[in-house]
Image: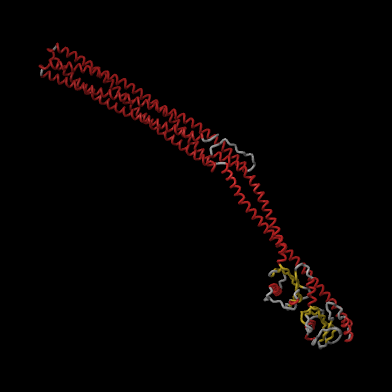
Amino acid sequence: MSEKETRKKRGSIRRKLLMFIVPTVTLAVIVLILVATTISKNRMTEMAIAQLDSSIANQGDNIESWLDENLVQFATVKQMIEQTRPDDRELQDILNAYYGYYKNAPDGFHIGSQAGDYMAAADSTLKVSDPTSAKWFQQGLTRVEMGYGESYTNENGDNVISASGIIDDGSKDLKVIAADVTLEKISIIVNSGVKMEDASSFLVNTLDDTILAHRDASLVSTTLSESSSDKLLAGVAEKIHERTYTDTTIGAYMVAFREIEGTDWVLVSYVATSVILAEVQKLGNVLFLIGVIAVLLIVFLIVFIVAKVIAPLGVISEHIAAMSSGDFTIDVDDSANDEIGQMGGKINTFIDSMRQMISSISSESDKLSAESDRSNEVSKLMYEASQSQAQAMNELNETVDQLANAVNDIAQNATTLAMVVADTRDNSEQASTSMKETVEISKQGKGDMEKLSQAMEEIKEAIDILVASIDKVGETSKEITGIVEVISEIADETNLLSLNASIEAARAGDAGRGFAVVATEIGKLAQTSADSAQNIANLIHDVAGLIDDAVEHANHSADNIRENSVLVSDAVDTFDRIYNNIQESDRLMGRMIEDVEKVDDVATNVAAISEEQAASADEILATSQNMVEQAKSITKSSQDVADNSNELAETSRTLTDYVKRFQV
């Protein structure tokens, strides 16, 4: 792998890490911003509600204090009247005296009786036509102590709330004293008591759902309704009807409730949610800006850290690329105390293992090459010896063929001799002519017998040479068998080394895939060598069997030739005697008749011997032909051994070439 490709691979790892880490960090920062914003929103909402509660509590306290202060003042006047028990003139003076005395009740006090009498300050502009039907009178009849009742509109058209109660001035007539407080005054108290910025309040009488005080004067004295078009007023009406006075959100407002003690009034304070969330929005913008800066800073740090972390991986990937190209001279740095250092250590262990294995394979390859060369030389010697044997067997076959022809000639001559003897017996007149022919035939027979004797000697010598050659071939085949066993052992060891190499390559994963292919090819070559060695062993075993058969036939032929040699010698002696007798016959013609029987017996014996010799010659010829075929088979087997040796040498060279690709 080139350096550019290695950097590209390294860059892709960096990109992958950044593609996973940067979005994760960005998402985490966004989540943190959202969480912080939500928490801030909730916290600020809680703070706003707390502030709203504090504001409404302060308002409620102020209203209660203001109402109590008024009631105390009103109760003081009532108590004074009850204690002094004034007459009508004195009572009028008291009413006149307190006219305008209390700013919260500018019209002062007024008294109505059940008899329909009405008394007020002389300067009072309050109009009362029928005091018994007035709201303040009817409300006052229900309590002894002065207290606030429902709001109403008096005959002057003013929206007021009356503080009224039964007064005991010593008279027999039931009277009610009252002081009117205008709702405008209450609205001023309610609106001025709001402590929270941008918040507003209004006061509601829960008995009739009347708004007692509101910033919007048009809403004062109106009645709350759940069907109101104003969502705030409709929601407040629903809460009041449910008597649920907990803090809540109604529409776009946060709303808090406060019951005014001693009354049926409820103070409602509200603030727009957008006002509170405006600060949250500002905080969110600030957090977003901080998040963007944090993301940029974190991305820069991540890029720097990733570059630092994967730098050793880049070096390791370069070493792995070198190993994939067959270079095992590298040394990986494993000094780091982390997973990368452990990876480097494992790679160094793998490199050491590969060095040892490749060195072992190289050594075994050299041994295999040497043995294959030696096997090739032996196969060549065996091939040459088999060719010599085949040539000798061909010569033996020709000699035996000549011997067979000679024996046939002898048999034919012996038959002719018997016929001549018979003819001599029948026709002695042709004896002279026949004797001459016999002399010639005996001369030829003597020559043939001498040739036969010489041929038999040559056959004997050839058989001895053949036996020696066959013995030498047997010894050579034993040596080849030993060499084949060595080759088979080397092939087995090579196959075992290939299996170990495949296992190591499998442990190495993708990095050892190339070497796994080499190991597989080595295993195939080793298996081919083992199969070739086995074939050679089988062929040598067959050759050894054929050699044993050839030796047996050669020994048998040698015995037959020895026997035939004796017979040939006897025949030579017989022919000598025949020749001598024939020569004697010229001089002893007279004794020929007497000796004809003897000659006839001798001729018969010669014919029988000749036939036996002819049969032996045929057997020798068949054996010789068989030995020729065996010699050809040995030659072919020797050629196969040579071919296998060449293939083994080629396999050894291929294995050596594979091993030379690695640098250790």
513 displayed left or right of 184: left
Q: Quadrant of residue 394?
A: top left
Point out the image quarter for the C terminus. top right
- Given residues 640 and 610, the one toward you in this image is 640
80 displayed left or right of 22: right
- Given residues 255 and 626, the one toward you in this image is 255
Asked whether the viewer can see residue 583, the reply is yes
Please give the name of the residue rendered at 32% of the width and 24% of the height, measured from the top-left corner: 392
The residue lying furthest to the bottom in this view is 115
Relative to 91, say whether 469 is above or below. above
Asked whether the viewer can see residue 138, the reply is no
Query: Could you tell me residue 525's position as x and y percent?
Result: 45, 36
Relative to 411, say whether 203 is above or below. below
Query: Could you tell me residue 333's position as x and y percent?
Result: 62, 38
503 displayed left or right of 380: right
The residue lying furthest to the front in this view is 4
- Given residues 617 and 130, the one toward you in this image is 130
Point out the image quarter for the N terminus. top right
Query: Could you tell me residue 506's position as x and y percent?
Result: 52, 42
Please give the name of the residue rendered at 15% of the width and 21% of the height, measured from the top-left corner: 419
Query: Could you tell me residue 286's position as x and y percent?
Result: 71, 58
